[in-house]
C-alpha cells in the first residue's frame, strides 16, 4: 500500500507494530515513542521516503531533512498521546494513578516542553544522543532489578508482594474492583508537601522537586520528540521510590501533557505528519493499549523493570551505532 511521500509499506505490518507499541507503553509507562521511532526509521524507512519525495518537489536537501526529522517527532508524540487516552482510565479505576503527583510534575513539564523543540540538532546527532540517553537509563533500570538495589528499597518490595498476592486472590474471584480498595489515597497535599498511601505504605513527595524534575525531563524528551516516559519511569521509581504498579499509570498521564505541547511546537516548525500512516498505527496502538493494563497486573514488578531495561539497552546501542560498528545489521 502506498502512503504519503511515496512510502510503500504493508498496512498489516504497521498495524502489528502499533499493537506492540501500545502494549509496551501502556504496560510499563515508557518506550512508546521509542518504539514508534524504531518502526518509522528501521522497519518502514519513513524518513528516507519523505526526504526523497520532498527533494523531488524542489525542496532543498537540508530543508527536507529538517521537515522529515520534525515529522518523525510528531508521529512519535501522536503515538504516546493516543495510548494514554486508552490506558489511563483503567489505571485510574484501579487507583493506580497518583493525580496530585502528576499535576506537580506537569507544572514543570509545560515550561520544558516549550523549550525543548527550540534546541537545534541534526538527524545524525539526534539519533546518537538519543541512543546515549536511552542506553544509560537502560543500565540504571537493570541495576534496580538486582538484589543489591532492591534490598535498599524494602518499602517497594513490601508493596509489590502485597499487590501480587492480591492479584493471585482476585484471579479466583474475578472481582477486580477490589484492587482499587488499597490503591492511591491522598493524606495531605499542599505546596510544601504531598503525602499519600498506596497498599499500606506511605510516601512523602516534595512538589517543588517534582516540578523541577518534570521541567528538565520535558526539555530532553521534547527535544528528541519523545513523550518522556523513558525518563519519567526511572525518575518516579528511583528518586521517589515508587512501585511500578503506580508509576506506569502516573507516567503516561504526565506524558500526555508533554506530548500535546511538543506537537504544537513541531507543527509550527514545519512538520508534515502522514495521517494515513499514523492512522493505521494508531489502530494497533489502541488494541495494544487496551490489552496492556489488563495483563500488566499478572507480571511481577521486578520483571516489568527488566523488560523496559532490555528495550532501552538494546536500542540505545543501536542508535549510538555500536551494532553497525560490530558489523551486526540490526
Image (spheres, rainbow, N blue to C red):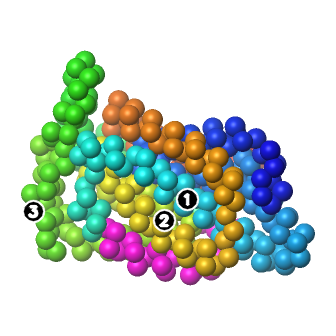
Residue segment shown in magenta: 105-129
What residue is pinned by disc 3?
A: 188
| Image x and y of residue 209, in percent | 26, 71
What residue is pinned by disc 1?
A: 78
Membership of 123 in magenta stretch: yes
Name the residue at 66% across, 71% down: 271
Dominant SS of magenta comes to helix
Res 226 label: none
* Residue found farthest to the top: 172
Name the residue at 27% across, 44% down: 93
Name the residue at 20% across, 68% down: 206
| Image x and y of residue 69, in percent | 68, 68
Crowd rating for badge 3 (residues with CA inside 10 Å; few <14, some 14–19, many 20+): few
Q: Nearer the viewer, residue 321 or 166?
A: 166
Label 1, label 3: how far apart the Cα atoms are: 35 Å
Badges 1 and 2: C-beta atoms under 8 Å apart? Answer: yes
**Residue 141 visible in rendering:** no
Q: In the rendered structure, which disc, 1 or 2, sits on the residue that comes first in sequence?
A: 1
Crowd rating for badge 2 (residues with CA inside 10 Å; few <14, some 14–19, many 20+): many
Residue 313 lies left or right of residue 148; in this view the side is: right
Q: In the rendered structure, which disc, 1 or 3, sits on the residue that comes first in sequence?
A: 1
Amino acid at each position: 500500500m502506498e502512503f504519503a511521500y511515496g512510502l510503500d509499506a504493508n498496512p498489516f505490518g504497521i498495524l502489528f507494530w502499533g499493537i506492540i507499541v501500545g502494549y509496551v507503553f501502556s504496560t510499563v509507562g515508557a518506550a512508546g515513542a521509542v518504539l514508534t521511532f524504531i518502526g518509522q526509521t528501521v522497519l518502514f524507512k519513513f524518513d528516507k521516503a519523505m526526504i526523497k519525495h520532498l527533494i523531488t518537489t524542489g525542496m532543498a536537501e537540508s530543508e527536507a531533512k529538517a521537515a522529515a526529522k520534525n515529522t518523525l517527532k510528531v508521529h512519535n508524540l501522536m503515538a504516546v498521546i493516543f495510548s494514554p487516552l486508552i490506558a489511563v482510565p483503567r489505571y485510574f479505576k484501579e487507583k493506580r494513578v497518583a493525580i496530585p503527583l502528576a499535576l506537580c510534575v506537569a507544572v514543570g513539564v509545560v515550561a520544558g516542553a516549550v523549550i525543548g523543540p527550540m534546541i537545534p540538532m541534526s538527524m545524525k546527532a539526534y539519533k546518537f544522543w538519543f541512543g546515549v540517553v536511552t542506553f544509560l537509563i537502560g543500565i540504571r533500570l537493570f541495576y534496580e532489578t538486582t538484589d543489591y538495589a532492591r534490598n535498599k528499597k524494602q518499602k517497594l518490595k513490601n508493596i509489590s508482594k502485597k499487590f501480587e498476592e492480591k492479584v493471585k486472590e482476585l484471579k479466583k474471584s474475578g472481582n477486580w474492583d477490589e484492587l482499587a480498595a488499597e490503591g492511591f489515597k491522598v493524606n495531605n497535599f499542599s505546596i510544601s508537601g504531598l503525602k499519600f498511601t498506596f497498599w499500606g505504605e506511605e510516601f512523602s513527595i516534595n512538589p517543588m522537586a517534582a516540578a523541577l524534575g518534570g521541567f528538565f525531563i520535558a526539555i530532553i524528551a521534547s527535544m528528541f520528540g519523545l513523550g518522556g516516559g523513558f525518563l519519567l519511569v526511572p525518575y518516579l521509581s528511583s528518586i521517589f521510590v515508587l512501585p511500578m504498579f503506580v508509576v506506569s499509570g502516573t507516567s503516561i498521564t504526565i506524558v500526555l501533557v508533554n506530548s500535546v505541547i511538543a506537537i504544537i511546537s513541531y507543527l509550527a516548525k514545519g512538520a508534515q505528519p502522514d495521517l494515513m500512516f499514523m492512522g493505521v498505527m494508531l489502530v494497533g496502538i489502541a488494541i495494544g493499549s487496551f490489552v496492556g493494563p489488563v495483563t500488566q497486573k499478572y507480571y511481577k514488578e521486578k520483571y516489568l523493570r527488566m523488560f523496559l531495561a532490555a528495550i532501552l539497552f538494546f536500542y540505545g546501542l543501536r542508535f549510538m551505532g555500536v551494532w553497525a560498528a560490530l558489523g551486526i545489521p540490526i
